Amino acid sequence: MPSTIRQYLLVDNKKCRRNSAPEYLGNYRSPYGSRILDSRHYWLRASTSDLSVLLDNQSESGSSLELDTSNLSRELSPAPTTKDNLSEASQGSYQSIPLIHFEIYRRREEEYSVWNVLRSWSIWRIVFLSQIMAGCLTVMDYCNKYMKTKSHNVIVAGHCFANYIFLSVLWTTRLACRNDERGILEVLKLSGLRYVLLSVLHVEANYFLLSSFQEDSYMGNQMIDLIAASLSLVLAYVCLEVQFQLTHVNGFALSIIGGIGFCVANAVSKTGEDDISWGDILRIGSGIFLALNNLAQELIVKSIDSVEYLGMIGFLGSFISGLQTILLNGNKTLIGNSYYWTSVISFSAVQFAFSCLAPLILRDIGTTGLHLALISSEFYSYLIYWLNEKDEFQLLYIVSYALVLLGFCLFVLKRTTIGTHYFFPVKVIIPKGS
């Protein structure tokens, strides 16, 4: 590729610069980050049968190169990764794979190893963000319990209303400012009913989650994510055609064992109820709703983008959450209860951060990986309980937390991808700089 060409791609209105790591290419990220780019020789693989576009120093003329995939087939041809395969690939004699996205490959071969992946910041970024989300879930739990103990006029349905207002202010405004074919009016016209159903699912999932936080539990909050992770693993494989590898299965098994260890630790330390309670039933229902909601969110985030999803959820969720609050709690009022308002706003701010971080995790590791990470929130809940009660510390919590974190790290070593037919045709534009 000529040195005069600016080193970024514009893929479905997403810009990825040369030095950003990891590079965002289509709907997926490269495990090597920016090191996958090579300024002299590019292979671009596209959604067509036996088609590969080679850009080199002699192939470019004009102001830009455009590749429109709207009329191409759904089969993909993997670009060659070694110098020896260049002549073979140019003849179209390589196998197709079920992914519709664009990706740039280095001309020279770079060995894939676990050590190379562990050195990548993208892996540790996922681990770090996932633990922030687990901490947010713990804070949401204790905010709900605090509001329950301090007020007799608890409005569970209204706790999420401020969160949807925050989402609409940021993401709906950003979606409305788009000047392309995926603006808010076009989305409402083409996919309005779908987003209404998704917004209802999102609101009810949060309602079940907060209702379960209001009740005591024998098994603990990790039961929510144990149910959600197990259900999402099955649904992702059946519905989204996610191909889980052995690394994913091993990581999933370790995290589930750690989650079961939390259940045993709760029974030993008796931090919850003495028997199965209404809170446990609500947690099981919440896990089912969250798995369905996050699975739908994963599909949209990977096939379209997160701005559209969060913008539409914030816009429609505000109306649905407000209507549900009026219907369920129309005779209750918060006027004059200033500390309750402060608690609700604080809770909504944490929930807003949780909602904004979720697409970043779902785009890379999917719904199953997200819920595996959230199992570790039980450890943070126990730390708060232990600091308040000054009881004897249970080492089983540390062992369980280590198993959950180790399993999650194994799970994120390789990205998860969804099936072919969920993607939309896009246009790739590689402009030249001056």
Image (cartoon, rainbow, N blue to C red):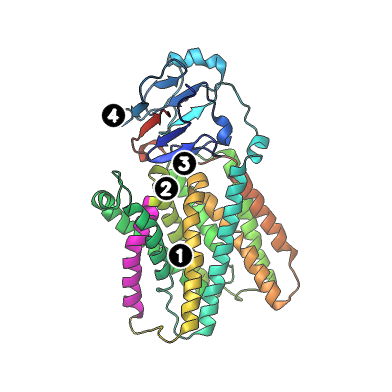
Q: Main secondary structure of the magenta part?
A: helix
Q: Which residue is mark 1?
A: 285
* Horizontal side, residue 114 vs residue 221: left or right: right
Gap in angstroms between the C-alphas marked 1 and 3: 24 Å
Residue that carries the numbered disc 3 in the rendered image: 242
- On the image, the x and y values in percent for residue 391 come to 73, 75
- Where the C terminus falls, by quadrant? top left
Q: Which residue is more in the foreground, 274 or 98?
A: 98
> Mark 3 or 4 closer to N-term?
4
The quarter holding residue 257 reads bottom right
Residue 327 part of the magenta-drawn span: yes
Q: Are marks 4 and 2 in contact (CB under 8 Å)?
A: no
Name the residue type under label 4. Answer: Asn
Position of 258 compared to 311: left or right?
Answer: right
Please state the horizontal and vertical placement of residue 125, each as a whole percent of the image: 59, 48
- Which residues, given as a range, are shown in magenta? 308-329
x then y, percent, for residue 170: 40, 59
Along the polypeptide, which appears first: circle 1 or circle 2? 1
Label 1 sits on a secondary structure element that is: helix
Name the front one of labels 1 and 3. Answer: 3
Alpha-carbon distance for marks 2 and 3?
A: 15 Å
Reading the image, the residue beneath label 4 is 71
Q: Nearer the viewer, residue 326 or 393?
A: 326
What amino acid is labelled 3 in the image?
Val
* Label whose residue precedes the other's in the sequence (4 or 1): 4
- From the image, tell me which residue sits under label 2: 301
